[in-house]
C-alpha cells in the first residue's frame, strides 16, 4: 500500500492565510479559491458555521463570501447538499496527477491530507486568528482509493451526483482525474468498519506534523519509522537524505516547500503501516 501525504487547504499562496484550528481542538481545512467553481463559500456550512463568514473574517475580505470555492477533497457529507449516490472524492490534475501516476498510485492506496493551520477564535466582529499563535502543518483527513476515473472518460449522463465537483468545471485535460473513496478502510493485515474517507474529529498531538518550537511549519517531526534506511526509497520529493535527521524516538524532516503529493511505498516501511493503524483505528 502506498501512503500519499497530500497538501490541501488554504496557505499563504492559495487563499492567503492558514486554515482555522478552533479552541475545542476541531480543525477545518478551508477549500482554496476557484473562480470556475459552481460553489461559493457562502454555500458551504460546516458544523453550524457558514464557511463564507469564516473566510471573510480570517482573510479580512467580506467579498470572499461570494467567491468560488474549490471543495476538494470533498469528504464531509453534511457540508453541502448532496444528490443521491454521493461518495467522498478527490480530484487531481496537472503535474501533481502526473506524479501520482508515475508513482503507481491506485486502488487501495491511502491519502492522508495535511494543511497549514493556525489557532482561530470568534469575536464580536467575526472570526479572527489568535494573536501570537503560530501556524503549523497538521493532518486533518484521509481517503482510501476505491476507484480511479479520468474525468474525460465520464459519459455525459454518468454519475449525476458528481457534476457539482470543481474538477468537472475545468477545461479538458487528460490528466484530470477523480479518486473515489472506498466504502471501508482496509490497512495491511487489518479490515475495519471505519469509513474509507473522513476527517479527524479533533486535531490531537499525534496529528501535528510541525515539530515543537520549530522555526517554520515545514520543519516536521515524524515517527522514527519514516526514516529511510540505506535500502529504502524515501518519501517522494524528499530523496535528498540531508533533509532527514534521526533521533532516538523520532525523525526530523525539512519538508519540501513545493509539491502537493508526497508518496511512500509502505511495503518497505512496516513501522509506518503500524503507525497508520494506530492513527486511524
Image: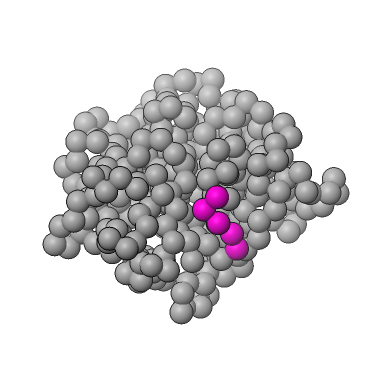
Determine the residue positioned at 42% across, 21% down: 60
Residue 199 in view, yes or no:
no
Residue 159 forms part of the magenta stretch:
no
Q: Is residue 254 above or below residue 108?
A: above
- Please tell me in which quadrant of the rendered image residue 171 appears: top right
Q: Nearer the viewer, residue 132 or 174?
A: 174
Query: Where residue 63 appears, x then y in whole percent?
Result: 54, 20
Query: Where residue 67 appears, x then y in whole percent?
Result: 59, 26
The prevailing secondary structure element of the residues shown in magenta is: loop
Residue 106 forms part of the magenta stretch:
yes
What quarter of the picture does the C terminus occupy? Answer: bottom left
| Residue range corresponding to the magenta coloring | 102-107
Q: Is residue 111 left or right of residue 17?
A: right
Q: Nearer the viewer, residue 235 or 277?
A: 235
- Please tell me in which quadrant of the rendered image residue 29 appears: top left
Determine the residue positioned at 46% across, 79% down: 189
Q: Is residue 142 left or right of residue 87?
A: left
Residue 178 in view, yes or no:
yes
Q: Is residue 264 above or below residue 38?
A: below
Q: Is residue 244 above or below residue 40?
A: below
Amino acid at each position: 500500500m502506498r501512503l500519499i501525504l497530500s497538501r490541501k487547504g488554504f496557505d499563504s499562496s492559495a487563499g492567503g492565510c492558514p486554515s482555522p484550528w478552533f479552541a475545542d481542538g476541531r480543525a477545518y481545512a478551508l477549500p482554496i479559491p476557484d473562480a470556475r467553481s459552481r460553489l461559493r463559500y457562502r454555500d458551504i456550512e460546516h458544523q453550524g458555521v457558514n464557511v463564507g463568514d469564516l473566510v471573510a473574517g480570517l482573510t479580512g475580505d467580506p467579498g470572499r463570501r461570494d467567491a468560488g470555492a474549490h471543495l476538494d477533497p470533498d469528504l464531509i457529507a453534511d457540508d453541502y447538499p448532496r444528490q443521491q449516490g454521493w461518495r467522498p472524492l478527490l480530484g487531481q490534475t496537472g503535474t501533481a496527477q502526473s506524479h501520482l501516476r508515475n508513482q503507481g498510485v491506485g486502488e487501495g492506496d491511502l491519502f492522508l491530507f495535511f494543511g497549514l493551520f493556525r489557532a482561530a477564535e470568534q469575536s464580536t466582529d467575526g472570526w479572527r486568528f489568535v494573536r501570537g499563535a503560530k501556524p503549523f502543518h497538521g493532518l486533518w483527513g484521509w481517503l482510501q482509493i476505491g476507484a480511479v476515473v479520468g474525468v474525460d472518460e465520464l459519459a455525459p449522463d454518468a454519475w449525476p451526483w458528481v457534476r457539482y465537483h470543481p474538477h468537472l468545471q475545468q477545461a479538458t485535460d487528460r490528466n484530470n482525474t477523480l479518486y473515489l473513496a472506498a466504502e471501508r478502510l482496509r490497512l495491511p493485515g487489518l479490515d475495519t468498519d471505519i469509513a474509507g474517507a473522513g476527517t479527524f474529529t479533533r486535531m490531537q498531538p499525534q496529528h501535528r506534523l510541525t515539530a515543537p518550537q520549530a522555526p517554520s511549519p515545514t520543519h516536521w517531526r515524524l515517527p522514527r519509522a519514516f526514516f529511510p534506511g540505506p535500502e529504502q526509497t524515501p518519501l517522494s520529493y524528499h530523496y535528498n537524505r540531508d533533509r532527514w535527521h534521526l533521533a532516538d524516538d523520532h525523525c526530523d524532516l525539512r519538508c519540501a516547500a513545493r509539491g502537493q503529493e508526497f508518496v511512500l511505498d509502505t511495503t518497505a516501511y512496516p513501522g509506518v503501516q503500524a503507525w497508520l493503524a494506530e492513527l486511524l483505528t
